Image (cartoon, helix red, strand yellow):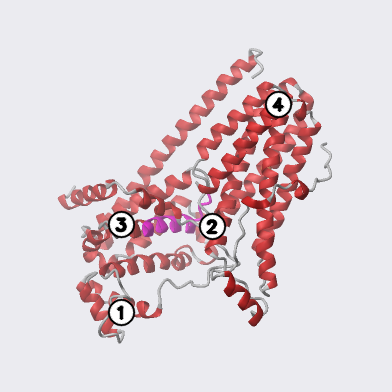
Amino acid sequence: MVPRLPVRDLTSRMLPTSSRRQLSTSSKTNAATTETRSTQHPPPGKRKPLTKEQRDFLSSALRVNQAGELAATLIYTAQTPVVVARHPHLRPLMKHMYDQEAGHLDTFNALIAKHRVRPTALYPLWQVLATGLGWGTALMGREAAMACTEAVETEIGDHYNEQIRTLLEMVAEWEADGYEVGPELRDLISTLRRIRDEELEHLDHAVEHDAQKAEPHWLLTGVIRAGCRGAIWVSEKV
Amino acid sequence: MSPSRRFGTSLASQLLRTPLPPSTTRTAFGRHCYHSYDHPPAVAVSYGSTEQAILSAAYTHVPQHGFSQRALALGAEDAGYPTISASVLPDGAFSLIRYHLVTRREELSGKTKTIFGEKNLGAQQLSTAARVEQLTWERLLGNKDVVHRWQEALAIMAQPSYMPSSLKELSLLADDIWFLAGDTSVDPSWYTKRASLATIYASSELFMTTDKSEGFFETRDFLRRRLEEVKQMGSVVGSVSQWLGFTANAGINVLRNKGLRI
Ligand SMILES: [Fe+2]
Ligand SMILES: [Fe+2]
């Protein structure tokens, strides 16, 4: 049906990581950490408890991902009838992307419930905004709808990459100190990688379907990308 | 309705209507942080050992002496600290109240197995609502031995400096009960469920302080009725928003059938 495209490596396109937080794996100061590293080795199989900072990071990461995937399902839900009515051949593509978004949302809903994280408080607001964005861009035409996907997926892809890097650094630091890493975090990293790859696949589909022919492309994607960054910033907090 | 019962409900609603400073409301829902199964926090114990020893000894004096300095002093003596230093328990009587709140709440997750059976076999036959009722009732029974002292405790908890801590404990209790009952909803109902259960728990607890019935069956009735009311209210809210969504969709579909490409 829809060919799986080779996944683009985003690392080269990454923005400078100034906004990304570096998490210390120790609740003590950094000086204390280096000292422990050289003097004592934990017994094999020992796992380090998460620090408050790490737990806060994981909470807000899961919360913002839930909000983002909720928005994504709603954007496609709103776009599909309009786009498909004018371009019936896009039905399988729209359905394929929607199905993947619905899968992502289920994944994060389950993780939020399992790890007892407070869900996003602005649920109704995201519902209204995402539906409006999806419907609005679809009414502007196929190219605008695809430009919307392009803009959203670019931001989301970067956002997932930042989370993956932060987690990889955390895991690397544990391993350097001789601690074991539980399956919970390894699974989370591989889940995030899979979802990021699927988002980038959506980005490729959008570009293939003339996202960049939307007029005025720069304004449309600029506004939507700024909106995404704002929404991510808000849902990390609320 | 007996006069004592009316007193109970009106005081509860008064307590619940007290406006809170913004910082307090933040703490009430701000503690739901990532819960790790593979990398749990190192300190699982809620108290230091001296504190723990004094508080657990003092707790046995609460039925007779209330949540008071007197009970604390007796507890410190029993634990081998004849003069308690103020730095160990800076909150005085409130630290004893908090000890009660924390230990009774933490006990609940252990009791879940006894109530619903090993591997939650029994729980599968019960609805989430029934499990919530059962767990809330179990927690109310945790007040049984101190119920005649509980109004004094509530008066201390309502003091402005202790209000945030008391509310935080209440919100943790509501969160624990929904979690232990197996609820996995992560939509806006997450908030309304916790807020309404916290309200119901607080009013049932107050009702119980004046309940003289056998085995507190009137409190159990009160609890059941309040939960039932919320269930009905929830379904009204749910069907209104469903109806709004349905109407909007139907309108759009009519226009689409008329050939509009929207
Ligand atoms: Fe997604
Ligand atoms: Fe996507």
Which residue position is annotated with label 1?
B57
Q: Which residue is mark 3?
A: B163
Residue at 25% x, 72% y: name it. B62
Packing grade of label 4 (10 A; few <14, some 14-19, many >=20) is many
Q: Residue under mark 2: which chain is it in?
A: A
Identify the residue under disc 2: A56
Q: Nearer the viewer, residue B198 or B167?
A: B167
Q: Which one is earlier in the sequence, the residue at label 3 or at label 1?
A: 1
Residue at horizontal 59 percent and vertical 33 percent from the top: A130
Question: Which residue matches tag 4?
Answer: A144
In the rendered image, the vertical position of residue A2 relative to residue B184, given as above or below: above
Give the structural element (helix, strand or loop) at label 1: helix
Q: Are discs 2 and 1 less than 8 Å apart at CB?
A: no
Instruction: Report the amino acid beneath label 4.
Output: Ala
Please name whichever residue, B164 or B249, is drawn nearer the observer in this view of the structure: B164
Do callouts 2 and 4 mark residues in contact (Cβ within 8 Å)? no
Magenta-drawn segment: B168-185
Q: Disc 2 to disc 1, how far (Cα)?
A: 36 Å
Q: Residue furthest bottom?
A: B80
Q: Report the amino acid beneath label 1.
A: Ala
As measured in the structure, the alpha-carbon distance from the residue carrying label 3 to the one carrying label 1 is: 25 Å
Q: Position of residue B227 (x, y in %)?
A: 37, 48
Q: Between tags 1 and 4, which lies in front?
A: 4
Left or right: where B95 falls relative to A197: left
Q: Can residue A64 be seen here? A: yes
Q: Pick the quarter of the image with the C terminus of chain B.
A: top right
In the picture provided, is A89 more to the left or to the right than B187?
right
Q: Disc 3 on helix, strand or loop?
A: helix
